[in-house]
Amino acid sequence: MGECSSPTQADLNEELESILQANIDAGAPGLSAAISASRGIVWQSTAGFANIESQESISKTHLFGIGSITKVFVTVIILQLIDEKLLKLSDIVNEFLDKSIFYKIENASTATIGGLLSHTAGVESWEDDPKWIVEGRGKELDTSWIWGKTDTLEYIRRPSSLTRGKYSYANTNFTLLGLIIEKITKHSAESEIRRRILEPLGLKDTFLEGFEECPRPESGRVPHRYHYATDKFRENAGICPSFSQHMWKKNSLIDATGSNLSVEWVAGGMVTSPSDLLKFVTSLRDGKLCSPASMKILKAWQPADGAEMGHGLFRIKSPSGMWLGHNGSVLGFTGAVWWKEDADCVVCVLANVGTMHCGDVPSSSAHVALNPRFLELATELAAYEA
């Protein structure tokens, strides 16, 4: 009896493609995914549609919102400021920001930089506020409005039941970190992201929407942005009257293409391509953006809702090993980017469908990127000799 042969690269590619297609069949309108190693991208593919009505296909060059993966860019700048001796993990918010900014936001004034980065500051997230959900993503959303950088803080000026020192994920933490970056550098956070990260790495397809000139859907560079209109989303947020509604793969979707991500700012407002995101994360992984001391800060792991949280980065356990990275979800998009702790492999999956405030959904970027089989295949493919 002959021995079973190892899978070829073609076999691995085919199975990766099948995972993408299965997630399209389950309900994601479009997906764009890539896997890289130090030698570059070893696999890249797309599935589904940029526009489910015209059936325009997703392309490898389409740009997607990446949601909270934006926070990793902000984390890099904070760590660089620590490297430059302009900031310490033990510094507190009221040393930098005017009292009017954090007035009546419980635990904010004395939150430390470390607490903000690790989501242990005990500060409530504006994204969880019922009124904000309606006005920021739901039936009272003004799609033409460009939100101010501190507008979201108005929703959480009240007592909180959160405990300082205990993990509780909050967009507010990174809104405050963005404001601190601006105070220290005397430049906008978006210009610091561009100067410190995007320009040095040659990332020409990455933007902070609402605060920089950014490609719009009519340019053909950004797909339509869809969001699951589940019963839970309808109950919590309601449907913005300007959004069209569609049935897709037995799922109810809204087309939120007319909206923008300005409300997220540095907590989740970036758009990018898979290739740009892989370059950024690989540079971070390889210590090209922060000092060795700051990389230790990044990876100071603590328990966090079934995963581990460092300072601005998560670590998860999969059957294939430990993976470091971040997921993101905003109105109209989801994203996921992860690198393997003990191997030369980075995965990125972006989707033009949002999941926030929806409850259980059938498919998203995370459904692909954190699929144990996808990660196993990615590890095998990245290990092939160039």
Image (cartoon, rainbow, N blue to C red):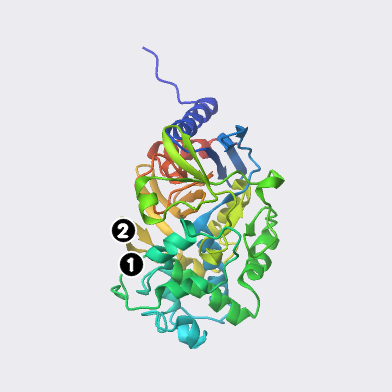
Establish if 9 lies above or below 119: above
Amino acid of disc 2: Asp
Instruction: Tell me if mark 1 has few (under 14), some (14-19) or many (20+) residues whose alpha carbon lies within 10 angstroms of its own.
Output: many
- Label 2 secondary element: loop
Q: Nearer the viewer, residue 250 or 141?
A: 141
- Label 1 secondary element: loop
Q: Residue at x 36, y 71 (%)?
A: 120
Q: Nearer the viewer, residue 162 or 154?
A: 154
- Identify the mark at residue 287; answer none if there is no mark: none
Cα separation, mark 1 vs mark 2, equals 8 Å
Query: Which mark sits nearer the N-terminus, 1 or 2?
Result: 1
State the residue lying farthest toward the front.
Answer: 241
Q: Is 310 placed left or right of 226 in the picture?
A: left
Amino acid of disc 1: Tyr
Q: Residue at x 57, y 58 (%)?
A: 143
Residue 13: horizontal and vertical position, in percent? 53, 30
Instruction: Tell me if mark 2 has few (under 14), some (14-19) or many (20+) residues whose alpha carbon lies within 10 angstroms of its own.
Output: few
Q: Are marks 1 and 2 in contact (CB under 8 Å)?
A: yes
Instruction: For the N terminus, give its image quadrant.
Output: top left
Instruction: For the C terminus, give its image quadrant.
Output: top right
